[in-house]
Image (tube, helix red, strand yellow):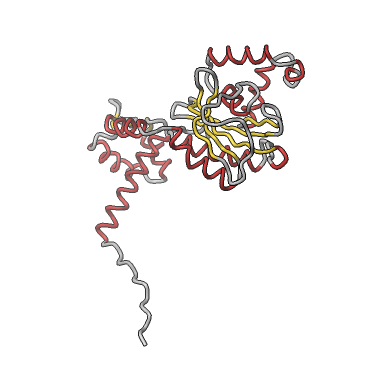
Amino acid sequence: MTASRLPETPEPLPRERRQRVQAAETCLAVLKALATLGGRASLTAIGAAVQESPAKVHRYLASLMAEGLVEQDRGGTQYALAAEAIRVGLAAMRQSDPIRLAEPALLHLREALQVTSFVAVMGNLGPTIVRFEEPGLPVTVNVRVGSVMSLLWSATGRAFFAFMDDDARADALLAQELAAAPAERRALLDAADPLGTLRREIRAAGCAAVRDLNLPGISAVAAPLRDYTGHVAAVLCALGASGGFDPDPQGTVARAVCAEAARVSASLGYLAPA
């Protein structure tokens, strides 16, 4: 009878190598803390961020300065990200495609919630779908890749207009849609300040949600994907049949959409306000 072999225990790293690994981890923590603090900070602030003594942090900053990743101002009181850090950041930014980075989020929403999910960008004619995922039992909707969504009446469009920077083209489209809307639709908006009130409500909720508004029998929730500047690069949306889809901004679907949007935005370099 052959004795079963016990799983091999990995040999511990030699002490010198462990120390090098720990030093590298601390050095990266210092660099990330400096980035989180806005790219420029005092020794005291960096030490507090990484929970290390200023003397220890100073040693790591000296190593980072030697590699061109950090520089010290002439007064010697502030440390800032330097040229090599900028080169690393630019290389990462060139790979930051919001559509590609959002694909795992689409799949997760589709599988976890059994909803249709898509990503849209702002095109010349309005919000345009560029990626689309359907669950095993898809909902019949007349939207596909290339479809242009309403800026005022769809969750996708509302997420764009509520969260994006001032855009004359979008303002013109909004004015056209509002003017062309039948009286019963306009009655759903605040009479005194229809767009301003709607924008404030969506921003307060953190996402845009509609029920049976853009498409009969269809509900949807959408949230913005922001890049490192805070600009809305795209919008992530989930939709489903209203009978089994809860568009409440505090509901399960909305929380999942907002969480996925936050993860994609973080991958694009966006730092959410504390």
Residue 61 is situated, as x and y percent measured from the top left of the image, at 30, 39
Image quarter hosting the N terminus: bottom left
Q: Is residue 165 above or below residue 80?
A: above
Q: Is residue 92 above or below residue 158?
A: below
Find the residue positioned furthest to the bottom.
1
Q: Residue at x 69, y 39 (%)?
A: 246
Of 224 and 114, nearer the camera is 114
Q: Is residue 153 left or right of residue 100?
A: right
Of 57 and 149, nearer the camera is 149
Find the residue positioned furthest to the left.
66
Q: Residue at x 65, y 18 (%)?
A: 196
| Image-quadrant location for residue 195 | top right
Query: Is residue 80 in view from this perspective?
Result: no
Q: Residue at x 56, y 47 (%)?
A: 111
| Image-quadrant location for residue 213 | top right
Numbered marks: total:
0
Q: Is residue 15 above or below residue 97?
A: below
| Image-quadrant location for residue 184 | top right
Of 264 and 115, nearer the camera is 115
Q: Residue at x 52, y 37 (%)?
A: 262
Residue 96 is situated, as x and y percent measured from the top left of the image, at 40, 33
Query: Is residue 150 in view from this perspective?
Result: yes
Residue 58 is situated, as x and y percent measured from the top left of the image, at 31, 40
Residue 31 is situated, as x and y percent measured from the top left of the image, at 35, 39
Q: Is residue 7 left or right of residue 19?
A: right
